[in-house]
Image (cartoon, rainbow, N blue to C red):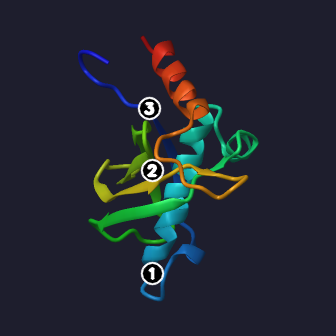
Amino acid sequence: MSGETHFLYAEVSMVTSFQDADPMGVVYHGNYFRFFEEARRVLMNKLSYGYREMQDSGFMWPIIDTRVKYVRPIPFNHEIKVKATLKEWENRLRVDYMITDALTGERLTKAHTVQVAVRIDDGEMCFASPAVFIDKVEAWYASTL
């Protein structure tokens, strides 16, 4: 793509719940992955390549790497926005995340996950993303021109 690059993204809003919090009243670090997952699910649905479509196409996409930077603690009963942005897709699936305060826009957390395609029939990891996925990403970009 020439010119300014724009990326496919999805954003979800949610309110943290009591069950998300640790005894100190802030969101337990392991629960952030549920927030990332929800934003990634919405992102992949924009491509019409959600979990059922992945399975139907013969691939699963396990996470092989992740990084989280906890910038500020998030208390329970707090409204947040979680943005998931598709950054890489040709050889692997990299999604970047940003959690912000829904009212102030203050950055609370940033992260990324990396996933690879694995064929369901034989369990072999693919060294390039399958054509079915590349075609969906390219179709989305073509529709935004």
How many tags in the picture? 3
* Number of the label disc, if any, that sits on residue 8: 3
In the picture provided, is 106 more to the left or to the right than 31? left
Could you say where residue 10 lies in the image, as x and y percent from the top left?
A: 49, 38
* Number of the label disc, if any, that sits on residue 82: 2
Give the residue drawn at x 51%, y 71%.
31
Q: Are marks 1 and 2 in contact (CB under 8 Å)?
A: no
* Residue corresponding to mark 1: 25
Give the residue drawn at x 51%, y 28%.
137
Residue 33 appears in the picture as rendered = yes
Q: Residues within 10 Å of mark 2 (few under 14, many from 20)?
A: many
Q: CA distance from mark 1 to mark 2?
A: 20 Å
Q: Compare residues 63 and 71 and report the one nearer the observer.
A: 63
Q: Residues within 10 Å of mark 3 (few under 14, many from 20)?
A: some
Outermost residue, top side: 145
First of labels 1, 2 by sequence position: 1
First of labels 3, 2 by sequence position: 3
